[in-house]
Image (cartoon, helix red, strand yellow):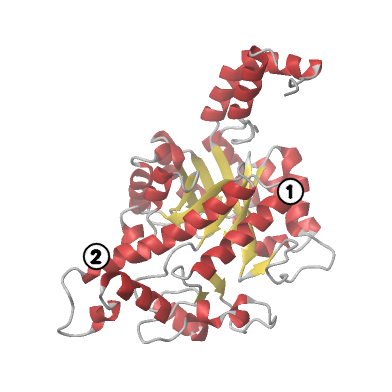
Amino acid sequence: MRPIVVPRLLRAAAAAAILLLPAYAEAAEECPCRYFWVVRDDLSSPAGIDSLVEKAAMAGANGLMVQVVGRGEAYYSSSILPRADFDEGFDPLAYLIARAKPRGMEVHAWMNAFLVWSSPQQPSDPAHVWRACPDWFMTDRFGRSTREYAPAECEAAGIVGATLSPSLPEVREFLAAIAVEIATGYDVDGIHLDYVRYPNPSFGFEPAAVGAFALETGMDPLDLYRSGSRPEELDSLWMAWRTRQVTLTVSTIRSALRAECPGTLLSAAVMADPVEAPVQYACDWRAWLEEGLVDFACTMAYTTNSARAMELAVLGTASSAGRVVHGIGVFNQPTESALPAAAEALRRGARGICVFSLGTLPPGDSWRLLNLWGETERPVHGIDVSLLHRVAGATEAGL
């Protein structure tokens, strides 16, 4: 075997890395996430993106969670999803990356997972999953698909729109393919999942799900709604089974990313109450963190009730603080009202703060966020400490 030859310049860089390694590691550990969610409606033009990136920079942001998959459409160049409504020849994700990265900001590609349509009009593109795969959607307990719900019915039922079923392997592979397409095609730091949950316990009774559960347990989940035939353990079995389907979706995406682009981070926007999330939404995000399925979770603590906000800051950071980015809303309240709970989450060890959303942040409120998290511009995940260890090890070995 031929010896590995390391150029002199690389050997010098490696030697310097040995000396700087503790400092780099400490910086990567101490620098908090200062993120903003960026919604797809704000990506329609270069001028709009320029304005957003400038606003983020003024607020001291070091990361943007950019919605590039919404309503089952792509805000990037995709061979899987139909193109969203933006100018021909313009690639919103590529343009934003080119503007944000030089400003020291990470870019995480935010994709809606199970939720794929929420407009009153049906999607027109025959390739859209709503039209191409009608059997992939959740149904209610009466067998009615979420594709058939009108906006007013969605609101009454507590859903946003047409929602894919996590119980189908085809759905899980479809979402994994989208994540890999983005991560391999663009210089993104991570994939950020949203709507990776059931909308509520009243949905998820599609025939494939009911059949799979019956095959596994010998029980029919519809017995939950039939008088006199409800087995005592059915509630807990059905809840656990649904939770496994969502977790399996996250695991499928994680495995695909590790195989194709192992350096890409995976995160998820989750309901902020870790006790309620598995029960109401089959979203056991604490387990995802413990099992390493996601690198961090962004808790959506958007409440305008100050007491509840403080409670969520405590609950969300308990036992998982270093891997939780506390999410606050400025779309539904003054910025200053959302900050006390954010400060409490940071005090309790939260990995950082994510603000929803950049577009709704009042232009004059940047200073409030700077006061909260400081002005350093270093990206949170920009330093690959493991790489420094490998380079340092190669130098010490005389390679």
Q: Position of residue 285 (x, y in %)?
A: 40, 52
Q: Position of residue 304 (x, y in %)?
A: 42, 57
Q: Residues within 10 Å of mark 2 (few under 14, many from 20)?
A: few
Residue type at tag 1: Ile
Against 53, is 174 above or below?
Answer: below
Left or right: 230 as drawn, with respect to 75: left
> In the image as oriented, which residue stretches furthest toward the right?
89
Residue 368 visible, this angle: no
Q: Residues within 10 Å of mark 1 (few under 14, many from 20)?
A: many
- The residue that appears at 77% across and 20% down in the rendered structure is 5
CB atoms of marks 1 and 2 within 8 Å: no
Residue 320 visible, this angle: yes
Q: Nearer the viewer, residue 172 or 323?
A: 172
Q: Nearer the viewer, residue 237 or 56?
A: 237
Against 9, is 169 above or below?
Answer: below
- The residue that appears at 82% across and 62% down in the rendered structure is 90
Against 244, is 101 above or below?
Answer: above
Q: Earlier in the sequence, mark 1 or mark 2?
A: 1
Report helix, strand or loop for mark 1: helix
- The residue that appears at 66% across and 45% down in the rendered structure is 56
Quadrant into which the C terminus falls: top right
Which residue is labeled 1 in the image? 97
Quadrant into which the N terminus falls: top right
Q: Position of residue 9 (x, y in %)?
A: 80, 17
Q: Nearer the viewer, residue 186 or 281?
A: 186
Which residue is labeled 2 in the image? 236
- The residue that appears at 33% across and 47% down in the rendered structure is 315
Left or right: 346 as drawn, with respect to 256: left
